[in-house]
Every structure is written in structure tokens, then in C-alpha cells.
Image (tube, rainbow, N blue to C red):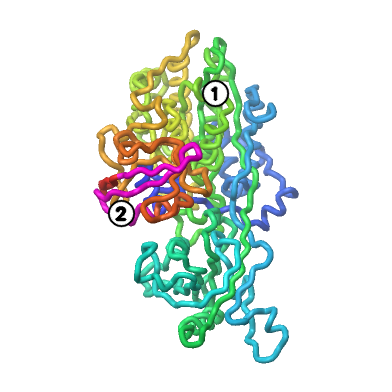
Amino acid sequence: MPPVAGSIAAAFRAVTFPLAAAIPAFAVPLALEARQDAWQCPDPASLIGGLEGEAAHVRYLADDLLEGRAVATRGERCAGDYIAARFRELGLRPAGDAEGYFQAWMVRTGSALGEGNEFAVNGDSPAESAHGGDTPAGFALGDDWMPYGFSASTRARAPMTLVPALAGAQAGDAAHAELTGRALVIEGTAPHPHAAPPDAHRVASSAAAMDAAALIVLLGPSDPLPSLDSERRAALAIPVIAVRGDAADRVRTAAATAAASGAAATIATAVEPVRREARNVAALLPGTDAPAGRTLVIGAHYDHLGFGGAGSLSPNAAGQVHNGADDNASGTAVLIEAARRFAEGPPPAQDVLFIAFTGEERGLWGSAHYVESPLRPLEGTVAMLNLDMVGRVTNDLLTVFGTGTAEEWAEILERANRRTAAPLDLRLNSDGFGASDHSSFYARGIPVLHFFSNTHPEYHRVEDDWELVNADGMARVTGLVTAVVREVVPAPGPAALTPVEGAGNPHGVRGPADGGTVRSGFRVRLGTIPDYSRESGGMAITGVRDGSPAAKAGLKGGDIIVKLGPHDIEDVYGYMYALGEFEPGEEVEVVVLRDGKRMVFEVVVEGSGG
């Protein structure tokens, strides 16, 4: 499950979900990936030992040797192979591509340097300094400077201007008109010990909106240069670089005297996206009396944070393995054991698709890909049951979200719970949206349930290890899920669920049961449900909340927001920045692409409620 803390998470909550939202996880370093072909997955027997059932699966998936299972890494690949092997042992049919167990596609996992990166100030370049004479020493790529992974790949030569800050500045502000066409130089370190350093991406977005030629961020001598490995944000319209140490001092001096000396910067940046294969793992248990195309989906994501990075809540933990035993080896373990119980019989009347998603920690990538390229018809999908963080059942408590997405859910859960050997104390939440893969299905009008044993101090931290999970609690969740499926898909007879009003319409979806707004750090909300899998070219939305400002204005699922007020929107980050500029009650012009046509809507934004 994506993290609940941080400015990006807060922004996503304001835009979409009542819980946490997705922020990017850290990718395995490229040097490790280069050795992947020679790397062998650990033998399950050597790790599992005498453990059985759910505990055995968590033990394997959450071992350090799988390196945190970040999407499209070697650890994630080993986890996927393990899940597929378990499905094969159970005799489940492959339900992926090409009659296999995997549904594969390419994802962007980071960025890398291309050819031709150069930085010079008035001829202060390695190429020119090689000729000797009075030319100062040049700037060394990788030692003195580095482009950011979101930098444009382009070349610019422009006079330099030292500016204090640009975060939150509006495009077209008269005070910044003189910055057009200039290479802006800002301090990248915090102004005092209790302040946060400026966000380079946000400042660069503002600079690009003001038609600056480039942005140069000055760092201290001990500050690290930007790492491109895990940077997947869309390229901005201008080159953006960081310069540190003595080189930063030279740039600072040149920029401070540029008005008199005419100092100019020459910047050439070449940054390329890195793409690798990601894989969902899918298997089908055929029903005994299955109408054509009718399927119940049980899912869980199996990826986690890898070596930490932006998604980690452990301080100073970048580079340390985050094993994600509860998040979400536990849900994956219950998925496998639920498949075992059905495979051992009696089989259900209708088809059941078991699917382990990847990329959930990056923004529901796997489930978003599935609903765009479904392995089974979405119109015949009876329901989706999601398992995310079910490994810490305490005091018999289990929360089930989505109970308001079908009229029968509360009664079904009550009957199913009574049928289990050890009933749980169920806490029901009606909302069908949340920070996990069920949201992708509910946005398409499919009834959902999301099983969740609650968060804990080890959430998204290095300490979330297999020894801390509650094996008995996971087994009880497995029993409950299988009982729910047998209630939904009786033998014999067709499944019968009645979606609530709005659940069958991906263009208008229900909000919280109390009609309240989602609390967040933002002043306003629109009520959109972003498509997190879209990388650039605007922020696509999968749906809008019923009664929200977006719904009242006429926005709907499938729209791509390309402009919000004066702000051009390239991706969800740009949308987040722009949203923070408005006040409750303000009328905002929203430009969208709908079926390739540009459309303009006037939206009156509402207060976010906190």
C-alpha cells in the first residue's frame, strides 16, 4: 500500500483518495540491473524451511535476497516466478499473455544520461580549457554538476540571473517578466537549519511557465548530485541542472555579477527514460457452471519499495532493503492460500481469476494496466476482492472497505464471517476508493471489497519483516475471503450483486458515505480520480466523484486535464502544484482533451475540509 505521509501523498489525497496515495518507490540501481541475467533467484526451500501456508509465502517474499521487490527489478521478477510456480502447482490455468501466467508490459523505472551533456559559463568548458591559455577549468559531469532526471533534453545559451526563489510563483507575474529567456540560478540548500530546501521540480515547473531558458540549482560541497535511477517524472520544457561545491561558488559569483559582466551559461542536457518489463501474475480457476465471460477477481499486489527512496518512512534509509512483509507479502500469501482452498474443492460455480499485481507502490500501475487490457471481460467481472496489508490482525479486528459498492456486501460479509472457524471482528467502510488496486476496478463500475488489518509502526519502514506477521490472523483472513466468494458465487447458480447507484458508471462515483470531503493538506478539491499510470501529456482521470466540483462542471472519466487556470499540466505533479494555488470558491478554467478534442470547463473549486 502506498505511503500516507509526505507532500505528494497529501496532494494525492486531496485529489482522489480518503487514505494514502501513491508516490514513486526507489528502483534498484542500474549497476545491479546490468547483472540481472547472471543472478539466480533464491531457492524457496532454503528460506522457508518448515513453515507452511501463508507464513511460508511471506517468509520467501520478504527475504532480503529479494531486495524489496521494487517493480521491474530482479527481486520483483523472482517474486513473480515464485507466485506463478505456486499457481502451477495448484493446477490453476495460466491466464496471462500467450497462454502463460504473466501479463507483461514496459514501464518507466527511471532515467539515464544520454550523449552530449555539457555545462559552461562564458566558455568555461572542458573542451575549451584543454587548449590551455587563460581559460578557467571546466565543469566535470558527475563531479561538479548533473542534470535532473526531469530535465528537458535540449541545448540553451542564456544570460544568468540569480533569483531568491520561484516556488509558487505565477506564470505571467509582472515581477518575473524580466526572467524570460534567462538561465535562473537559485540556492538549493535550506536558508537555515529549520527550513526545508526548495523543491527543484516545483521551482523548475514555475521557471518553465515563465519562459525561463534554464534552471541552475546550487548545492553545498557535501550535498549529493541528483540521482537519475528512480526519476520517472515527465521531462520539463527547460534544462534543469544541479551544481555543487567549488563549481557552485564559481557559478554563484558569475551570476551575481552577470548584469555588469554579461555572464551567460551554455547548458546541453540529454536525459533518456529507462524502461523495463513489469509483470502481473494471473491464474484462472474455471467454474463448474460458468456463464461465458463471468468472472470474480481476487487480487493482491506483490511489489514493495526495493531499497527505499521516496516511499520510505524510515529516516536515512535509502539503500537499505525494505522487505514489505505486511505490505504486501501478506496479501499475496493469502491470495495464494485462497487459491489453494478453491483448488482443493469444491470448485465454485463461476470462474475465479487470481491475480498478483505489480507496480502498486508506484501508483496502482498493475491494476491500471489490467483494466486497460483486461484478461477477462470487465463487463462480466462480478466483483474484485483486494488483499492489501492483512498480516497484522490484532484483537480480532479486520477492516473491510468498499461495502457501499454493492447492496448485498454487508449481509454477505456477515454470513461469510459466521461460516468461518474463527470469526473476525469486522469494521465496515463503505467507500470504494482507496490507496490500493481495488480503486482501479471501482473506477470502472465494478463492486469491490478491500481487506485490511490496519497500519502499524513498521509501515513502509525497514523493520517490516516476516517475523512480525500474524500467521494465524492471515489464515483467518483466507477463510473469510473464501467464504465471501462462496456467498457471491454459489454452487450452482449465478453470482448476484447489485451495484449501488454510481458504481456502474465510471463517469460518476460515490464519495464517502457521510457526504463529507476528504481531509488533506490542500485548501481545495476538484473530486477527480487520476490515472496514475499515465506518464506525460496531461493528467488523465479515470472518473470523478459524484457531486464534486468536477462532476458539476461536466468533467468525466477518460478526460485528460492539460491546463488548470494559467498552469499547463503535463502530469500529476504539475496538477498537484497548480491545485495548491487556488482558494475555495474560486472559479477555475479547466482545459481537457476528450476523444482528441480540446474542451474548456469552468469549475468552482471547493474547500477540502482540512
The residue lying at 41 percent from left, 40 percent from top is 529
How far from the left and from the top, in percent, is residue 264? 54, 79
In magenta stretch: residue 579 = yes
Tell which residue pokes out farthest to the bottom in this image: 134
Spatial CA distance of label 1 from label 2 is 41 Å
Res. 82 image quadrant: top right
The residue lying at 58 percent from left, 41 percent from top is 61
Mark 2 nearby-residue class (10 Å; few <14, some 14–19, many ≥20): some
Q: Amino acid at mark 2?
A: Phe
The total of numbered circles placed on residues is: 2
**Residue at disc 1, secondary structure:** loop
How far from the left and from the top, in percent, is residue 458? 44, 49
For residue 488, above or below residue 37:
above
In magenta stretch: residue 440 = no
Depth check, mark 1 against mark 2: the one in front is 2
Q: Is residue 346 left or right of residue 506?
A: right
The image's mark for residue 14 is none
Frontmost residue, 459 versus 48: 459
Frontmost residue, 154 versus 311: 154
How far from the left and from the top, in percent, is residue 330? 50, 37
The residue that label 1 is drawn on is: 377
The residue range painted magenta reads: 578-603
Tell which residue pokes out farthest to the top in this image: 492
Q: Amino acid at mark 1?
A: Pro
Res. 424 image quadrant: top left
The residue that label 2 is drawn on is: 582
Disc with the residue nearer the chain's start (1 vs 2): 1
The residue lying at 64 percent from left, 23 percent from top is 93
Q: Is residue 448 left or right of residue 370?
A: left
Residue 213 in view: yes
How far from the left and from the top, in percent, is residue 596? 50, 40
Mark 1 nearby-residue class (10 Å; few <14, some 14–19, many ≥20): few
